Amino acid sequence: MDSLTTYHLTIPATTLRLAEVRSFVEKHGKEHGYSAEQMHDVRLAVDEALTNIIKHAYEKDSTKKIDIELEINSEKLCVTLADTGKAFKVRALKQPNVLEYARQKKRGGMGLYLIHTLMDSVDYYRKEGKNEIRMCKNRG
């Protein structure tokens, strides 16, 4: 296994910065040889996770910060998002009925399902007053 390369970015908790984060993730992923399809999945998952942090953990308080760490090697790409907002209750999460959502034309509520579908592993942590979501995409 080759060495791990790490990149960092900190942004204010506003959706106005989502495009910057998507570009940051895509640029470094492509530099390490990840495909356009793989980077599409990662960008979408990161976008969903950031939006959840902004809306739910920080309740749209743009004075708060989100730390982004990107770790990449030839085997996998991992993105960790950290915030100091309200704790996320993983156990309260229910599997959405995708067909029912579509039938009722519901908006929202599918972000976490989408993240888990797009990424190969997703882990949540709460430590030292911080929430972290770590999402990884395997190369192969």
Image: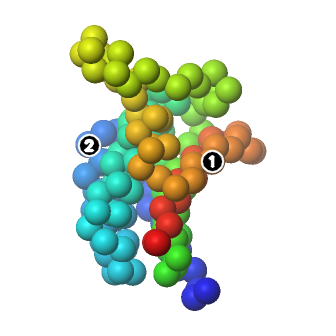
Pair 1/2: label in front: 1
Whether residue 7 is visible here, answered yes or no, is: no
* Kind of residue sitting beneath label 2: Leu
Instruction: Determine which residue is flagged by label 1.
Output: 123
Q: Secondary structure at mark 1?
A: strand
Whether residue 51 is visible here, answered yes or no, is: yes
Asked if residue 13 is positioned above or below residue 136 in the image, the reply reads: above
Q: CA distance from mark 1 to mark 2?
A: 26 Å
Q: Residue at 68% across / 26% down in the picture?
A: 91
How packed mark 1 is, by other alpha carbons closer than 10 Å (few <14, some 14-19, many 20 or more), is: few
Asked if residue 80 is positioned above or below residue 16 in the image, the reply reads: below
Mark positioned earlier in the residue sequence (1 or 2): 2
Q: Position of residue 24 (x, y in %)?
A: 33, 65
Determine whether, in the image, residue 44 is placed left or right of residue 105: right
Asked if residue 132 is positioned above or below residue 106 in the image, the reply reads: below
Report which quarter residue 61 is drawn in. top left
Q: Position of residue 107 (x, y in %)?
A: 29, 20
Viewer-side residue, 45 vs 56: 45
Q: Residue at 50% across / 67% down in the picture?
A: 138
Determine whether, in the image, residue 40 is placed left or right of residue 70: left
Q: Residue furthest right?
A: 128
How packed mark 2 is, by other alpha carbons closer than 10 Å (few <14, some 14-19, many 20 or more), is: few
Q: Residue at 53% across / 76% down in the picture?
A: 75
Q: Residue furthest top?
A: 104
Instruction: Determine which residue is flagged by label 2.
Output: 16
Asked if residue 5 is positioned above or below residue 57 in the image, the reply reads: below
Quadrant the N terminus occupies: bottom right
Q: Secondary structure at mark 2?
A: helix
Q: Position of residue 31 (x, y in %)?
A: 34, 80
